[in-house]
Structure formats: C-alpha cells, structure tokens
Amino acid sequence: MKRNAFPPNFVFGTATSSYQIEGTQLGNCGPNHWDSFAASGGTANREDGAIACAHYNLWEADLDLIAQGGFDAYRFSTAWGRVQPEGTGRIQESGLAFYDTLVDGLLEREIEPHLTLYHWDLPQALADKGGWTNQDTAKHFGDFAGIIADRLGDRLKSIATINEPWCVAWLSHFLGRHAPGLTDLPSAAKAMHNILLAHGLGMNALRDQLGSDHPCQQGIVLNMEVSVPASDDPKDIKAAAMQDGIYNRWFADAIFKGQYPQDILAYLEPHMPSGWSNDMSMISQKIDWLGLNYYTRSIIKDDGTNKFPYGEAIVPDYDPGSADRTSLNWKIYPAGLSYFLHRIHEEYEADVPIVVSENGMASFDVVDDDQVADKQRVGFFEDHLNEVAKAAANGVPVQGYFAWSLLDNFEWAFGYDQRFGIVHVDFETQQRTPKASWYWWKSFLGGPKTSAL
C-alpha cells in the first residue's frame, strides 16, 4: 500500500473527540450527561472523562505527534459544555479561547483543522430537560453551531454538525448502552428525529454565519454497519432488513431523500414529535460532504419476540487470539467499507464528496521496552485503505481517510480498557508512546508534515 494509490489531493488524517481526551475537570467545563451516566454505573468501573488524556493541558505535544506522523489533517470536536456550560445562554470565553488556540496550533503545523460540533457530550442542564427527546435541544444546538462558526469558521477546513446520530439516538435511548441509558421506543423515536433536526438547524446556522459560498465545507458524519441475516429464514432476513433500516437507511434516507424509510417509520411515527414531517426539508438540505464512520459488520437473527425491531445480533464466542476480531470482539470486515462507499454514491445517487471520517480497531496494547507492537492494527489499516483505494478507482468520490484514533482514550461505556489509539497513553502518568501503527503511518505518509518539527 502506497500513498500514490490514491487521488493526488486525497487527505489523510487522524481523529479524536473532546470528551474522550480533553479532561472535563481541566479548564472550565460544565457537567454533561456522560458524567452522570458514568456515576450511575453506565460505564466500566464507573470511569469517566474527568481527566482522560489531559489533552486540555498537553494539546501542543499531541499536535506535534500529528505533525511528526506526516498527517495532512486532524478531526476534533468541541465540548458544548466548555463553551456553554448550561448548553444555552452564557458563553464562556475561556472555552472558545482554548479551541481558538488549538486551531491556530494546527495551522502553524500545516495541519488542516476539521471540526465536529457535537460528539455526544450533551450539557447536563439540557439532559435534565429531556435531552434529545426535547426539540428545544435541537434549537439550542443551532445556536451553539452559530457561536462556533463565528469564532472558528474562518480557519476551519470543514465542519460536521453531528457525529453518528444512530449512537446519539438508538444506542442511547433504545438499547441503553450510551448516555442517557434509556431503553424505551417512544424516547428513541423522538431522539431519532430530533438529532436530525439538530443537524438541519446547525446547517442553517453555519450558512447564516459563514455564507453559502464559504470555503469551509459543511456536512454530517454517519456511522454505518453491515447487517447480514443469520440464515435464509425469512424471519432472519426481515430482522436484518430492520437493523439496516434503523442503523443505515433512516439517516441516509432523511438526508439525501428528505423522507424516512417506510418499514421503520411505521413503528416510530406514533411516538415522533408532532409536525415532524414539516422538518424534513430542513433536514435534507444540501450538504457539502458526508463523513462515513465504519468499523464492523453484524450477523442478525430473529429474536423470537415478534415485536419491533424483531432481531438481535449474534455475538460469537470471544476469541482473543483470532486474527479477524478486535479486542471488542468486533468482526474485522474490510469489504464493508467499500460496500458502503459504493452504496452511498450509487443508491442515493450522491455525487457529494465522501470522507472516511473514522476507521480503526481496539486492542489490548501494552508497552514493552518503550515499544508497542500493534501489528494487527497495521494490517487493519492496510486492508481498509485498500478498499478505499479500489472505491476511488471505481469512481466513488471519496476524498479522505481519518484513522481512529490518535490517542488511546476514554472509550465511552468500555472505560479505559479498550485502546483504539495509534499512540499509547499511560493514563496514570499521561506518557505518550507512539505504536508501530503510528510509525507505519509516518512511513506511508512520508514523514513530518512541517519543517518546523
């Protein structure tokens, strides 16, 4: 795998998110619903992002790692509560100043800044009022988007409104695995719509603030997962189709077609906000680019309940020695990445540029003699990049790839055990140790991006 296998202007980057690395106890950051979710036992060992990677203090060294690795770009997110502790009203200057300095630091190192406005850290004050089940949250998000665009928009290469709305809505409000940990269909249905309304209102705010012809590209990041029926049984096939509808089609159909898939809408509509259909034109307004996060596939079987959503994923026996599983027991399935790149471009007739905004794997990495030999992750990147290169060669307008993640970090409900980073972090000392995968990227990209380092 060589860089010249990709189009000349193809962008290679790495990515993080605010709550996972910054440390909410550092600086002035308001509480958010992940703090309360962790305190209630929703995360492994009740771990949270209070300190995380202490990136708030160590950001300069972290940006140096990006530059020294030769990356073109960095995708990061803003912590809503660091800028607006209550999620609305008062703006905290110190929070804006931190991101101001971070963006300038990237530009000084010749690294493109790519911002995600919301990567799951909802201010607790808004969570207390219903969070994403309350449409007011979407309206407040639009205000937040305008604040960030006003301060940072002149220097950003791109802005994504929302990261992974499926996780924000379904995983968090029906499956209960992420904050706020709800498990009821009415809450999930409201969140499934309101998070997309937030995207639309955010796009409006960005364009009002920056203008329609501003060079900063604006879009959204969707995560997609291959759903394979467990057998030829019609019930398994239906269950897999339901999973695909909830996970993939609900969001892509809304954005590109201005409608929800009928097979899923039949179950969610009774619980959705009144007048929801009036929001679809705002949700489906043209985007400049689409981010695709891709990790794995699922085998879906009928769950025997005869109730929506009818299916459940088959979880294979954990095999820590398997070459095709991550430490989270996720199937490594590179073909799924090119499948979705083609599907977005062809099924939705979308000529919009696509960026692989997250792709990576978890493993139990350890430091041995100041080295981390994460050879499986190197192979993971090579195999998935090969799929991206093939899709680009076949006419898919894929324009970038961001490795997840720069740093080992707070991995949400899994706490600190699962490591996705290309740089190892000792969470007690905050020592950074580049892994073999970081050195692989450095070689692939041709070394440091700037002569200043």
Image (cartoon, helix red, strand yellow):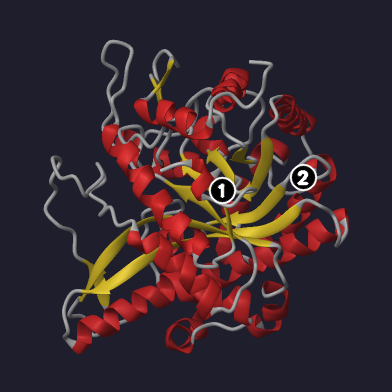
Q: Is residue 71 left or right of residue 87?
A: left
Nearer to us in this view, 102 or 411: 102
Secondary structure at badge 1 equals loop
**Residue 409, position as x, y percentages in the image:** 43, 32
Q: Is residue 201 above or below residue 261?
A: above
The amino acid type found where label 1 is placed reads His
Let me know if residue 130 appears in the view: no
Nearer to us in this view, 390 or 429: 390
Residue position marked by numbered label 1 in the rendering: 119
**Residue 369, position as x, y percentages in the image:** 28, 10
Image quarter for residue 83?
top right
Secondary structure at badge 2 equals helix
Q: Is residue 318 above or below residue 447?
A: below
Q: Indicate the quadrant containing the C terminus: top left, top right, bottom left or bottom right.
A: top right
Q: Residue at x 34, y 67 (%)?
A: 226
Let me know if residue 94 appears in the view: yes
Q: What distance separates the C-alpha of mark 2 from that of mark 1?
A: 14 Å
The amino acid type found where label 2 is placed reads Ile
Total labels: the figure holds 2
Label of residue 243 in the image: none
Image quarter for residue 348?
bottom right
Residue position marked by numbered label 2 in the rendering: 148
Q: Residue at x 48, y 28 (%)?
A: 442
Image quarter for residue 207?
bottom right
Task: Decide: few, some or many residues near mark 1? Use Cα within 10 Å; few <14, some 14-19, many ≥20.
Answer: many
**Residue 126, position as x, y percentages in the image:** 62, 52
